[in-house]
Amino acid sequence: MKYPNNGKRAIVACKCNVDPTSMTKRIILIACVSQKGDKKAKAKDLYISQLFKSSFAFANRQNPDKIFILSALHHLLDIDKEIEPYNVTLSNVPKAKRKPELKILTPAEKIISAKNIVEQCS
């Protein structure tokens, strides 16, 4: 690639008449869950809990431009990416490596939280 100014790179600025709101994308993030299928599948099909299914259905009803899954192993995960089942949760992260504001729910708190989310998404 040839650059102007004797082959040196230059910063070029342009003023565009583009409405910034026209470039806005609506993105929804869904938390992963521990209940997964037992074989490789698209991420949206691998997670099988009622919590995930309800969250995914709710997300789709919002007509987003894109939905991603926040995965403890894969981080930001495209819903159509094929992945193998895995067993990694934030609960497995040693306390010394956790951020102080990260709260790990007890099993009882997880059940209550999941029920509340399913009710809100239904």
Image (tube, helix red, strand yellow):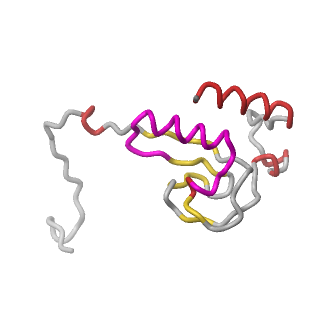
Q: Position of residue 49 (x, y in %)?
A: 69, 46
Q: Quadrant location of residue 113? A: top right
- Magenta stretch: residue 56 in it? yes
**Number of numbered discs:** 0
Q: Residue at x 78, y 28 (%)?
A: 112
Q: Nearer the viewer, residue 97 or 79?
A: 79
Q: Residue at x 60, y 43 (%)?
A: 53
Q: Residue at x 67, y 57 (%)?
A: 73
The span picked out in magenta is: 45-67
Q: Position of residue 85 (x, y in %)?
A: 69, 63
Q: Nearer the viewer, residue 105 or 56?
A: 56
Q: From the viewer's perspective, tell me whether residue 80 is left or right of residue 9.
A: right
The quarter of the image holding the N terminus is bottom left
User: Up-down: is 89 above or below 24?
Assistant: below
The quarter of the image holding the C terminus is top right
Q: From the viewer's perspective, tell me whether residue 24 is left or right of residue 16.
A: right
Q: Quadrant location of residue 24? A: top left
- Magenta stretch: residue 52 in it? yes
Q: From the viewer's perspective, tell me whether residue 40 is left or right of residue 112.
A: left
Q: Residue furthest bottom?
A: 1
Name the chief secondary structure element in magenta. helix
User: Up-down: is 72 above or below 84?
Assistant: above
Q: Position of residue 96 (x, y in %)?
A: 84, 47
Q: Position of residue 12 (x, y in %)?
A: 19, 52
Q: Residue at x 63, y 68 (%)?
A: 40
